[in-house]
Structure formats: C-alpha cells, structure tokens
Amino acid sequence: MNSLPEPFAAILLAGGRGSRMGGVLKPALIRNGSSLLAALLGELELLHPAPERIVVVGDREQLVRAIPESHSSSRLSWAREEPSFAGPVAAVSAGLQGVQQERVLLLASDLVEVSAGLRLLFDARTARDGAILIDSAGYDQPLFGLYGRAALSAACHHESQGTGPDSKAPSLRAVLARLELARVLAPDQLSQDIDDWPSAQRWGIIKE
C-alpha cells in the first residue's frame, strides 16, 4: 500500500440506531472473537503511516465496552452529533471538529473487510477533494472515502444550513455532489457493511 503524502485523520461513524436489526449496536457485534469496531481500529493501526487522529462518533459509554484497553491511545478521541441520531452529515460534522489534518479517512464502523479497500483507496489518484469507493453497480460508497478536510467540512456546513428540529436530515449524497472526487471501483464485498441480520450471518455474525 502506498503511504499517504501527508498526515491524515480517520473518522469512524458509529452512532446509528441499528433499527433494521432490532436496535442492536452494530459496531459492537462480534466476528472472529472481536467487535467490528475493535477490528477496524486494529486495521487502522496497521497502516503505514497510521492516522494521527482517530475520532469515533457515537455513544462513548456504550462503544468503549467493545474496545479492548490495548486500543486506548492518545490518538483516539470521541464525538457525538447533536442531537443524537441526527444523521450522517451531522455525525461527520461532529467528527471533523476533532481533527486538523488536511486529509480525512471516513469509514462506517460496521464495515467488515477494509484492508483491501484501503489499499485501493490509497493507491488511487485522487481528485481535488479526495476519492471514494464505488461498487460494481456504480453506487457511491461515501462511508469508505478519503477526503480533503476543508472541502468536506464546507460541503457538510452548506447542506446543514436552514435545517431545524422538524426538518429532514441533510443527505450525505447531497454533500458528495458538492465535491470533486475520484471514484475507485472495488469488489462489492469491500464496501459492504452490516445492514441487517441476513447480511450479518453471511459474515459469520449470529444473533445472541
């Protein structure tokens, strides 16, 4: 894997409701003896160089139980969107407040296989505002991308303008439409997250 030409941070979105799985905390699901969140943090530690800052956006009190003490690092910090469950744009904005690095790796915390996808992403030629993976059907995978921090922050801010308590949450795909991104084709399994129990079972995760 090529190393990034500049320091970068990672933001992991871990604050969803898991409503299609009965409200389960998806990043805490266990696969091969490890929670999905702990496995993802382990993958990031193997990068060379590793991210200078990792921000997990979600309920710290619940999620910290899914992380071994070995992951307690000065690089790891926590954030939460306000209000809770305000959607991915609010979560990304909350995570961005904790980073200063010019490049930001944005990942869903319930991804299962990330190492090959990271290789593709880091080896790709990025456009002005970054690069994201796309699947075989051509669908963008915004929660598997490497972004310019300033551009991502500005796009999130623009889409959040005018929203109120009764407004529909801004769309992450509308944010992407404001960015100039390279799109990197990847095998479907590299960008698949855990969406429901059938998808969890395909990856060897069973309901306890």
Image (tube, rainbow, N blue to C red):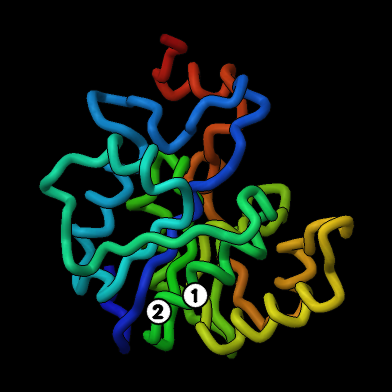
Quick one: label 1, few (<14), some, or many (20+) residues within 10 Å?
many
| Left or right, residue 183 beside residue 166 | left
Q: Mark 2 and mark 1 in contact (Cβ < 8 Å)?
A: yes
Picture coordinates of residue 97, whole percent (x, y):
48, 77
Q: How far apart are marks 1 and 2 (CA)?
A: 5 Å
- Where is mark 2, residue-wise? 99
Observer-nearest of 199 and 170: 170
| Left or right, residue 126 beside residue 40 | right
Observer-nearest of 88 and 144: 88
Query: Does residue 17 lie above or below 187 as drawn?
Result: above
Q: What element carries label 2?
A: loop
Observer-nearest of 117 and 174: 174
**Residue at (53% x, 68% y) in the render:** 94
- Where is mark 1, residue-wise? 96
**Residue at (19% x, 70% y) in the render:** 48
Number of marks in picture: 2
| Left or right, residue 142 beside residue 41 | right
Identify which amino acid the numbered label 1 is placed on: Leu
Q: Quadrant of residue 9?
A: bottom left
Query: Does residue 88 lie above or below 191 as drawn?
Result: below
**Residue at (22% x, 49% y) in the render:** 42
Picture coordinates of residue 6, whole percent (x, y):
31, 88
Quick one: label 2, few (<14), some, or many (20+) residues within 10 Å?
many
Picture coordinates of residue 172, whole percent (x, y):
71, 63
Identify which amino acid the numbered label 2 is placed on: Val
Which residue of the protein is positioned furthest toward the top in this rendering? Answer: 208
Give the number of the disc on residue 33: none
Q: What element carries label 1?
A: helix
Picture coordinates of residue 18, whole percent (x, y):
60, 32
Q: In which quarter of the image is residue 55?
A: bottom left
| Left or right, residue 159 beside residue 73 | right
